Amino acid sequence: MVGRIAVNAEYLKEIEKARRDLRHLISTKNCAAILLRLAWHDAGTYDAKTKTGGPNGSIRHEQEQSHSANNGLKIAIELLEGIKAKHPKITYADLYQLGGVVAVEVSGGPTIDFVPGREDCIDCTGCTEDGRLPDAKQGVAHIKAVFYRMGLSDKDIVALSGGHTLGKAHADRSGFEGAWTKDPAKFDNTYFVYDKLSVLHINEICIHSICIIHDESNFCIHSICIIHDEYYDVSRELLKGNSEELLQLPTDKALLEDPEFRRYVELYAKDEDAFFADYAVSHKKLSELGFNPSPLGSKGAVKNCTVLAQGAVGVAVAAAVVIFSYFYEVHRRVK
Ligand code: HEM
């Protein structure tokens, strides 16, 4: 169940402290990618129709953790236990989502607005059945079905898939091996644009050659090329064919097959700012599936509380002045 918890000034302070601890954890344990995957897997079980699943900390329960899509995430859950112990007020649900937000930021990605207040599912009543997260071996129809179930759009699907700019697949966890980008510690748009250097010299033509072996009739039987011309396949932006060292899951490749998906792949390949802006919006949506932030969850709300408190003090002082003046006047007349 995802609902409301008491988000007051003290809770917000703890969130800021946990944020600092997360930055430290990520820099010492190099765990940004797995924290992002944990946040996504806790949230990605959401079903908008039945309002079940979503970012409720259920992934920490063995029953959900043991789903095959979650292989390896125990590492991230255990890494976050230290921060939970230091800040016990913060719910697991908030901590896991905060971990995802901080992971993206410290890896060079966009700043994602974080609103606290997610409630934990206690004894796995909020756990979902296996099979809600996407299967990497499938294609367009499957991806759409899974993300539409969460209430997300085609744009969200492509932007969020850009999360594969971080980290790698591990054969012992998913059966796949390798990273999606050349620098898997950096959050950028290279998931959509393969490093062009790796695709240079794909097509070479010789524009000047010299003969090094002639036969008796002076016929050239072996020549070497001394000037090449290179066709750079500059259109080979993201996902165009397999790269030898970089990974493409069937679900990554599917982003090129659907025209609506492809439109965003091409945009993000060209324009990193557009990717960052859309990613930040989609990530926030994902992290808030089924969660209706209480007005106190935002800093503005705390500010409002302060304003209200100041207002109340003002009213009390004014009332005291009026009462005092009244008694003073009565006292003066009696005299
Ligand atoms: C169609 C949707 C998706 C599929 C099928 C999928 C599948 C996978 C698979 C198979 C792995 C490899 C796990 C391993 O072997 O360690 C992986 C890793 C990862 N995924 Fe996804 N994923 C999807 C969407 C997302 C989204 C939406 C995000 C985040 C916004 C994300 C973030 C990551 C990250 C950061 C890793 C690397 C983890 C690490 O390095 O330990 N994925 N994903």
Image: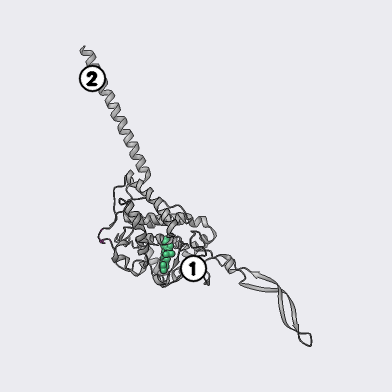
Disc 1 marks a residue whose amino acid type is Leu
Q: Residues within 10 Å of mark 1 (few under 14, many from 20)?
A: many
Q: Which secondary structure class fits the magenta region best?
A: loop
Residue at screen point 61% across, 68% down: 200
- Front-most of 269 and 94? 94
Q: Is residue 184 visible?
A: yes
- Front-most of 56 and 236? 56
Image quarter where the C terminus lies is top left
Determine whether, in the image, residue 329 is placed left or right of residue 305. Answer: left
Q: Which residues are magenta?
A: 122-126
Return the x and y of residue 195 as percentages of the image width and height: 56, 65
Single out the residue that lies furthest toward the front: 28
Determine whether, in the image, residue 300 is placed left or right of residue 206. Answer: left
Residue at screen point 35% across, 36% down: 307
Q: CA distance from mark 1 to mark 2?
A: 81 Å
Image quarter where the N terminus lies is bottom left
Determine whether, in the image, residue 247 is placed left or right of residue 9. Answer: right
Single out the residue that lies furthest toward the right: 217
| Ligand 1 within 8 Å of the CB at mark 1 | no
Q: Is residue 275 above or below residue 318?
A: below
- Return the residue at label 1: 256
